[in-house]
Image (spheres, grey):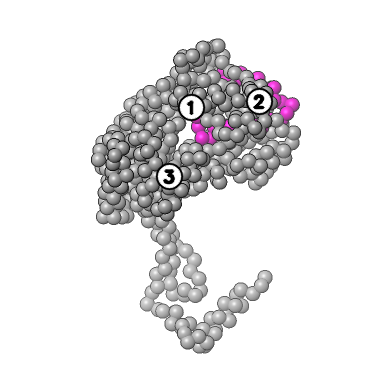
C-alpha cells in the first residue's frame, strides 16, 4: 500500500492491520538497528525535509487558508531539523549499556541495563502543527531503532498528502508509513496493537484513544492540552509581560496546545494589562485580514466554535475587547481578531474549555498565594508561565504548582528545547518525548544479570540453616538495623 494512499472505508481495519503486520515482520528480521543504520534514517529524514521544505510550507498555508511561511519554518521545520541533529549527536551515548549496582546476594554477578527498540510506533498527528507533531515523535522513534506508522489529520489534508509523498520517496513502507483518511480511519488506527502509541490532541479524544489502546495493552504517550495559565507578579513590568504574552498568543492565532489560555493579573493592573496587550498585539499585527503573518482559523467549524465562546461570555456579562487594529471586516474570512475577555466567571465556556484560538481571558488575583490556589484548584495544565524577576518566588511557583512544563518570563518556547522532556501531567497528558526522554520513551530498558563461573547461590541454597546461609543472613540483618 503506497504511503500516500487514502484507505478505503470498506477495508480500513484489514488494510491497516496488514500494513502493521508487514512492518512488524520487517522489524523482527532486524530487531536492533545499529547506530549507523539509525543515523542513516535520520539523515534521510533531514534531507527529505530540506528537499520538500517549500512544498510542506505551502501545504500548511493551504490547509489553514493562510498561515505565514515564516511561522511554519520557525515552528515546524527548524525544530524538527534541530531535533534530528541533537539525536544524532547523542545517540552513541544513549545506546550504550549502563552498568548497575549489584546487590550482595548476587555476589559474583554483573548487572546492566540494555536499551532495545520497541518495534512499531503509532503516531496520531493533530491539525494545528501537522508537520512537527508528526515528525518530532518520528525522530525519537528512529533514534531508538523503531519503525513507525503515522496517521495525519483529516483537517490538514494537503499537509498529509505532501508529508506522505516526502516520506514514501525517502523510506520504504516497512520503515515508515503515512496513513491519510477520515475520523473512521483514525479510530481504527488507534485500535491497532502497536508497540507504543503517541497521540496529540484534546483531552476528550485522548480518553477515547487510551481506552482503545487498553484493549491491546498498548502503552501510550498522550500529549493533550488544557488551560495553560500565565501568572504576572505585581512587581513585573506590565508592559513587558503583555509584549511577551502577546507574542506567544499570536502564534498560529492561538491554535497551539501550549498557548497561554488565561492570564492571572493583579486586580489593580487589569486595565493596564489589557491596554498594553492590545498595543503589543497591534504592533506585531498592524492589520489582520490581509496580513499573511496572521494565521487563519483552521476551519469554519472551529471559527464558529470560537465565536460561540465569545457570544457566551458576552451573554454572561463579560467585557470583551476586540483587537482589530485596521478595523477589518472579517465577513467571508476564516481569520478572527484577538479578543481579550475580562470580568469572567467560572460558568463561562471561555473558562471551562480549552480555548485554542485568539481569545484571552484575564483573571484578577489579590496575592500570589491566591493565584497559586486558583491554578491548583483546576486540572493540571500542559504548561504554566510565570513573570517575575525574583528567583525565590519563581522557585515557589515550581514547587507549589503542577504542570507539564514551565517558562519563567517567557511563553511556549520550552517545547523546542531538545535537551528537556516535553509532556503533560494528569488531564494534560502522560509520558514524555524529545531528546533523551524520547529515546527512553521509545525503548525497552531491559535489566540483565550475568553470572560467571562461580555460583554463590549454592552456598545459601536449601536446606536452609546451613552455616553459609546463617552467616549471610546475620550479616545482612546487621546491615539493615534501624537507624
Q: Would you name the residue on which mark 2 appears?
A: 316
Mark 2: give few (<14), some (14-19) or many (20+) Cα within 10 Å.
Answer: some
Q: Dot 2: what SS? A: loop
Tell me which residue sits at (58%, 18%) in the image.
Answer: 323
Residue 210: x %, y % from top left = 46, 47
Is residue 380 highlighted in magenta?
Answer: no
Residue 132 position (above or below residue 298): below
- Looking at the rendered image, the disc whose residue lies closer to the viewer, 1 or 3, is 1
Query: Residue 268: within the magenta?
Result: yes
- x, y percentage for residue 129? 43, 32
Mark yes or no: residue 17 visible: yes
Mark positioned earlier in the residue sequence (3 or 2): 3
Q: Of residues 420 and 432, which is closer to you in this image?
A: 432
The label shown at residue 302 is 1
Range of the magenta residues? Answer: 255-282
Q: Quadrant of the C terminus?
A: bottom right
Comparing 209 with 230, the one in front is 209
Q: Dot 3, crowdedness within 10 Å: few (<14), some or many (≥20)?
A: many
Task: Name the residue furthest front.
Answer: 10
Q: Is residue 99 left or right of residue 373?
A: left
Residue 425: percent from left, percent from top: 55, 45
In the image shown, does 179 or 108 lie closer to the viewer?
179
The answer to whether marks 1 and 3 mark residues whose Cβ atoms lie closer than 8 Å is no
Quadrant where the image shows the N terminus: top left
Q: Which of the 4 quarters of the picture holds residue 412?
A: top right
Front-most of 34 and 6?
Answer: 6
Residue 385 vs 330, above or below: the answer is below
Image position of 315 with respect to 22: above or below: above
Where residue 455 appears, as percent x and y from the top left, is 41, 79
Which residue carries the number 3 mark? 198
Q: SS of the residue at dot 3? A: strand
The circle drawn on residue 22 is none
Amino acid at each position: 500500500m503506497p504511503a500516500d494512499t487514502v484507505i478505503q472505508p470498506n477495508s480500513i481495519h484489514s488494510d491497516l492491520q496488514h500494513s502493521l503486520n508487514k512492518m512488524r515482520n520487517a522489524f523482527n528480521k532486524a530487531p536492533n538497528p545499529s547506530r549507523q543504520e539509525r543515523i542513516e534514517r535520520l539523515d534521510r529524514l533531514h534531507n527529505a525535509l530540506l528537499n520538500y521544505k517549500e512544498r510542506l510550507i505551502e501545504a500548511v498555508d493551504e490547509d489553514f487558508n493562510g498561515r505565514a511561511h515564516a511561522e511554519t519554518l520557525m515552528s515546524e521545520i527548524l525544530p524538527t531539523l534541530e531535533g534530528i541533529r541533537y539525536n544524532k549527536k547523542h545517540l552513541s551515548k544513549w545506546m550504550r549499556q549502563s552498568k548497575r549496582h549489584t546487590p550482595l546476594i548476587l555476589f559474583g554477578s554483573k548487572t546492566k541495563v540494555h536499551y532495545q527498540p520497541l518495534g512499531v510506533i503509532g503516531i496520531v498527528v493533530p491539525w494545528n502543527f501537522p508537520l512537527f507533531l508528526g515528525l518530532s515523535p518520528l525522530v525519537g522513534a528512529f533514534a531508538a531503532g523503531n519503525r513507525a506508522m503515522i496517521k495525519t489529520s483529516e483537517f490538514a489534508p494537503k499537509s498529509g498528502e505532501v508529508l506522505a509523498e516526502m516520506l514514501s520517496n525517502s523510506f520504504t513502507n516497512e520503515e515508515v508509513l503515512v496513513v491519510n483518511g477520515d475520523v473512521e480511519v483514525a479510530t481504527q488506527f488507534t485500535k491497532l496493537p502497536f508497540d507504543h502509541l503517541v497521540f496529540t490532541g484534546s483531552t476528550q479524544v485522548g480518553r477515547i484513544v487510551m481506552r482503545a489502546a487498553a484493549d491491546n495493552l498498548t502503552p501510550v504517550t498522550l500529549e493533550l492540552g488544557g488551560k495553560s495559565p500565565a501568572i504576572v507578579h505585581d512587581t513585573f513590568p506590565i508592559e513587558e509581560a503583555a509584549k511577551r504574552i502577546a507574542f506567544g498568543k499570536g502564534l498560529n492565532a492561538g491554535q497551539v496546545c501550549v498557548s497561554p489560555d488565561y492570564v492571572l493579573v493583579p486586580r489593580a493592573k487589569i486595565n493596564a494589562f489589557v491596554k498594553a496587550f492590545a498595543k503589543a498585539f497591534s504592533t506585531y499585527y498592524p492589520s489582520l485580514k490581509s496580513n499573511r503573518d496572521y494565521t487563519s482559523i483552521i476551519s469554519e467549524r472551529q471559527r464558529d466554535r470560537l465565536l460561540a465562546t465569545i457570544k457566551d461570555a458576552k451573554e454572561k456579562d463579560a467585557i470583551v475587547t476586540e483587537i482589530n487594529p485596521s478595523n477589518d471586516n472579517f465577513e467571508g474570512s476564516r481569520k478572527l481578531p484577538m479578543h481579550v475577555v475580562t470580568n469572567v466567571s467560572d460558568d463561562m465556556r471561555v473558562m471551562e474549555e480549552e480555548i485554542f484560538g485568539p481569545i484571552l481571558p484575564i483573571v484578577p488575583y489579590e496575592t500570589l498565594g491566591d493565584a497559586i490556589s486558583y491554578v491548583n484548584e483546576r486540572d493540571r495544565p500542559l504548561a504554566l508561565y510565570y513573570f517575575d524577576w525574583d528567583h525565590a518566588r519563581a522557585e515557589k511557583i515550581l514547587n507549589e504548582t503542577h504542570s507539564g512544563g514551565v517558562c519563567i518570563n517567557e511563553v511556549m518556547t520550552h517545547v523546542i528545547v531538545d535537551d528537556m522532556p516535553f509532556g503533560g501531567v494528569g488531564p494534560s497528558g502522560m509520558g514524555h518525548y524529545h531528546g533523551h526522554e524520547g529515546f527512553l520513551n521509545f525503548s525497552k530498558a531491559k535489566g540483565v544479570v550475568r553470572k560467571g563461573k562461580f555460583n554463590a547461590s549454592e552456598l545459601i541454597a536449601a536446606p536452609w540453616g546451613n552455616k553459609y546461609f546463617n552467616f549471610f543472613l546475620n550479616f545482612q540483618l546487621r546491615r539493615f538495623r534501624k537507624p
